[in-house]
Image (tube, helix red, strand yellow):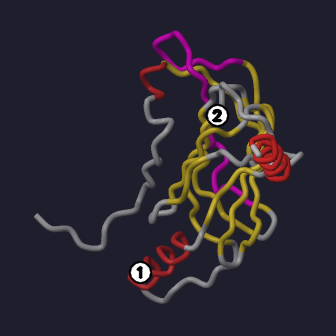
Amino acid sequence: MLRRTLLIALFLVAACKRGDDVEMSSDPTSVRGWVTDVQGAKRAETIEMELGRRAELFASTSVWVENVAYASGGIAENGAFVVLDVPPNSATLGFNAPGAETARIELRNVPANADVLIPNVILRPGGASVLDPSKIVVRVPGSGDKVTPTGKKATVAGYEVEIVESPLSQMVDRRDYPSVPGIRPVATFK
């Protein structure tokens, strides 16, 4: 009976394992940023309605890493996203949003232990763009006390980005949702 149970368990593990899954890295990268909107989305007439439209958009948006079953993360109510345990070197982030099903961001030549920041992402079906590619940051922990270029480059969402070494003390936010500039609560109380 024990042998039969063991065989069934092994069969189930083999059946659940997908052959295209990427092995978990001991030095994964983190990818953070924020979604600004979906390409071609119809803007609301008032600022209040626009804030409501975007809040609904972000609430119904999901993010994942293709062929990786263990990556964790999500999208906050302000559009900020964080995805941890992304494999280094090459990975594809997938987004599913109303009007931009299966949007993708390709990451290439991203080193191990890197933190990638992708601000102002505009999703579109099958792809994505960044409003200001010069604001994309790929940083790795360094031993110095200031940010230093490494001379190496990564490709993020089709844009070539300089990889920089950053002091370890400046990388404490690599597992946090980034602050989205310009997003403030509708009402504040004192």
Write the residue at 78% across / 61% down.
127
Q: Report x, y in % for residue 55.
A: 47, 74
User: How far apart are labels 2 and 1 at the CA level?
Assistant: 36 Å
Amino acid type for the residue under numbered disc 1 = Ile
Say which residue appears at 45% left-offset and 54% top-offset.
180
Query: Magenta segment, which residues?
Result: 128-150
Q: Helix, strand, or loop for circle 2? A: strand
Q: Position of residue 20 (x, y in %)?
A: 87, 46
Q: Amino acid at mark 2?
A: Thr
Q: Is 168 placed left or right of 108 in the picture?
A: left
Quick check: 22 left or right of 47?
Answer: right
Report which residue position mark 2 lands on: 29
Q: N-terminal of the two: label 2 or label 1?
A: 2
| Residue identifier under label 1 | 47
Crowd around label 2: few <14 · some 14–19 · many ≥20 (10 Å): many
> The C terminus is located in which quarter?
bottom left
The image quarter containing residue 120 is bottom right
> Helix, strand, or loop for circle 1?
helix
Q: Nearer the viewer, mark 2 or mark 1?
A: 2
Asked if the stretch drawn in magenta spans residue 119, the answer is no
Q: Measuring 75% from the left and 42% from the top, which residue is drawn there?
A: 2
- Asked if labels 1 and 2 touch by Cβ distance under 8 angstroms, the answer is no
Is 176 in front, or is 130?
176
